[in-house]
Amino acid sequence: MSTSDLKLIAHLMRRAGFGATRQELKEFVSKGYESVVEDLLHPGDPENLPDDLIRRYHPDHSELRFLYSAAGYWLYRMITTSNPLEEKLTLFWHGLFATGYSKLNQARSLLNQIDMFRVNGLGNFSEILLQLSKDPAMLLWLDNNDNHKGAINENFGRELLELFSMGIGNYSEQDIKEASRAFTGWTLGNVDYMAMRASKDSIWPYGRIAWHFEYRPDDHDNGEKTFLGETGNFNGEQIIDLIAKDEATARFVSTRLFQFFAADTVGEKEQETIESMMKSYFDSNYEIRSVLRTLFNSSYFKSEKARYSRIKGPVEQIVGAIHLAGSYSTPTIGIEEVAQQAFYMGQGLLEPPTVEGWHEGEEWIDSGALVERTNFASSEVGNLDSPGVRTMIQNICTNNGGSMSPETVVDKCLDMLGAFDVSEKTLSALVGHVSRSGNIDLNDNDEFENSENRLAEVFRLITASPDFQRA
Amino acid sequence: MPTSAEEKFRIEYLKTVGICNNGFSGRGFSNPVDIAINPDNRIFILNRCDPTRRTAIRIGICNIEEDYLGEFGYGYGDGDGQFVQPTCMAFDKQDFLHVTDEHNNRVSVFDSSGKYVSKWGIPGTGEGKINNPAGIAFDSQNFGYVVNQLENRIQKFTSTGEFVMGWGEEGSGTGQFNRPWGITTDENNNVYVADWRNDRVQKFSSEGLFLKSFGDTGESEGKFQRPSDVAVDKNGNIYVSDWGNERVQIITSTGDFHTTLLGSATPSKWANDFFESNQDELVERNKSNLKPNLPPHLNSPYHTSSQTESYFWGPIAVSLDSQERLYVVESNRHRFQVYSKV
């Protein structure tokens, strides 16, 4: 196994997933990069913490009435899934098609939307938009329940074009109105009662009643419409078909995927890769799987320039740290507090701040969030009681006899944290810190506890470094 | 004892008791997980939530006339009388309420007024130790049977917690278990265990001798998905909360399928009180179809129940009172439904 292969696959797993342990990387490297990409793109049935165990242990997760319970429920999935790209992509769609709890007061239906992203996320983009347009949480979030024949509410129609598919500047105000007309009659069952309960945050008498889509032909405007230059008696399905085949949509989707998976900022040098992704979009009949395959196999994505060029989002930071630590692999008291941590860091799952989703990149970091991020990661990865940390210590013990120099200690710890790289400045600081107490000898039984603690301290320092904020 | 095969009966819905309580004191339930009915007909409901709503973890008391009689709990933690993850409960023959806590690995004992009395059980693994206790039941001799879910064992204790004997191990063969949950005893002191992840109910003698197994994995009649609790009437009919299938199934003592209940909840007295002061919701509710046809992708028992208020959602515990009325506790709907046998 070459170091460059290892580092490349570690990069892929940080981006297409939430990072990988050293043992996982070893298996991935033996498969080869392209093969791992294909496995990620064809996830199959996932192995993850089973629902029945979660629901038995956490009655709150069975009902999913509370936001933190629902967020914790999703976190279990991210932490334990065997299909990391499926979950990472679901997180991407959640950010792009941002739908929030605060207006809806309906966590179960929000998680139904998340399930929909999980099922459709790698598939055809027009199908994703269609399912999104039938999603009860989205319909209520953007007021399509108030979009009626003869009295349109353009909120959903506007965001469908502006934030979800084409981007501003690629359609007219009239297109928004026509799209809105086409989506009249797209609502949810028992809409007035459900909307009232949502607005009043009513849990009475027997908790929430989850939502389902309902099409009301009597409330649909079946008249002729002109949209993006084409005319017909369009319903919502035809509007989506017209959106999906537009070049602006291909560019919008490819660019957003590029920003989420490849680089926070997009300049001229990145356009070539985005153009290739757009070509894959059309060649595959709008299939997201093909677009991502092009991205992950591109020379840009594999290049040194792409490495560590993204600031990890809070959920990536949390899930990545827990995955390394091996905690929360069974139902555990405290998962709701973990969900709350994501809120403190600025990314509350199922509660994006607005329909625009989260502002990403460097905007993730402010002084308060940085403290939360480093404290959380350090406490997870530096916890000697966690099974993943024990495995990392054990691997360092097994593979190293005798006394280790500070340089070797830091090198081994970085390797255990997923073949992680740090800057020269960070490396120097880490080695300098270890040097103050000298070599570490894991074969010295009298000093073993102290040596373990020193290794855990190195793990904590690495996770507190500026480098660990990046993926 | 007549065999239930000879007995002709049907089950009729009687009423619903409960309302969602957000964790504050007072009437209503918050994710109830078990029920115990006192000989004086007071109904004790065990509420369990995650630590973020720890104030809601307590035992509420009411009666079938829907009078809320009070509640008790000594806070969240491992102090005397406190709970972290209370799991199941049962009255012994001397009217003491025994409550298992799978986090604290012990059984807490209260008198029927809710006053803390004592605790028993030594945390740990192996014979006589308690490791993640779940169901608890007492027989006519006042022996207590505790489900050690992670040990896949049933252990028999005196009512003061002295170990008597135990049986079971991990597996799917007869007498083996996979994360067992609820437990009950019958008139003859036979023991019935909801063998949760084996999707069956097993019957044993009071000495742990395997007698019979009921059901296997599935959604059709007589099959189970993660049965969580079991109750047995005087004629040996078996009532199972088929938790994963969101239903209750009744099977005869010979193992024949008898009835499936999907739930028939109606507004409780407390629910009607709520609507009386929230007429706007009642008006919209009365215009709604609360038994909707659902899109195919939501047509699983869990999703159907999440959208259909009258159906069981999270039927987690079953119990019978002295008149053999059936009580079905729903953790996701904060209520219990009562059925009578006619």
Image: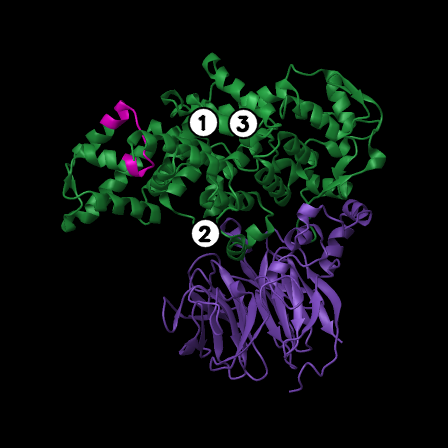
Chain colours: A green, B purple
Residue B219: x percent and y percent? 64, 61
Q: Considering the numbered disc 1 on the image, is that residue within a helix, a strand or a loop?
A: loop
Q: Earlier in the sequence, mark 1 or mark 3?
A: 3
Q: Considering the numbered disc 2 on the image, is that residue within a helix, a strand or a loop?
A: loop
Q: How many marks?
A: 3
Please check whether the numbered discs 1 and 3 fall on a single chain.
yes
Quadrant (top left/top right/bottom left/bottom right) for the N terminus of chain A:
top left
Chain bearing tag 2 is A
Q: Nearer the viewer, mark 2 or mark 1?
A: 1
Quadrant (top left/top right/bottom left/bottom right) for the C terminus of chain A:
top left
Residue A167 showing in the rendered view: no
Q: Is residue A416 magenta?
A: yes
Kind of residue indicated by mark 3: Val
Kind of residue indicated by mark 2: Ile
Q: Quadrant of residue B324?
A: bottom right
Image mark for residue A291: 3
Residue A88: x percent and y percent? 50, 35
Residue found farthest to the top = A268
Please check whether the numbered discs 3 and 2 fall on a single chain.
yes
Cα distance between the residues tagged 1 and 3: 10 Å
Residue at the spot of label 1: A297
Residue A254: x percent and y percent? 55, 23
Image mark for residue A333: 2
Q: Quadrant of residue A105?
A: top right
Chain bearing tag 3 is A
Between A195 and A230, the residue placed more toward the observer is: A230
Q: Earlier in the sequence, mark 3 or mark 2?
A: 3
- For the record, the magenta segment spans A414-428
Between B264 and B99, the residue placed more toward the observer is: B264
Q: Does B18 sit left or right of B278 as displayed?
A: left
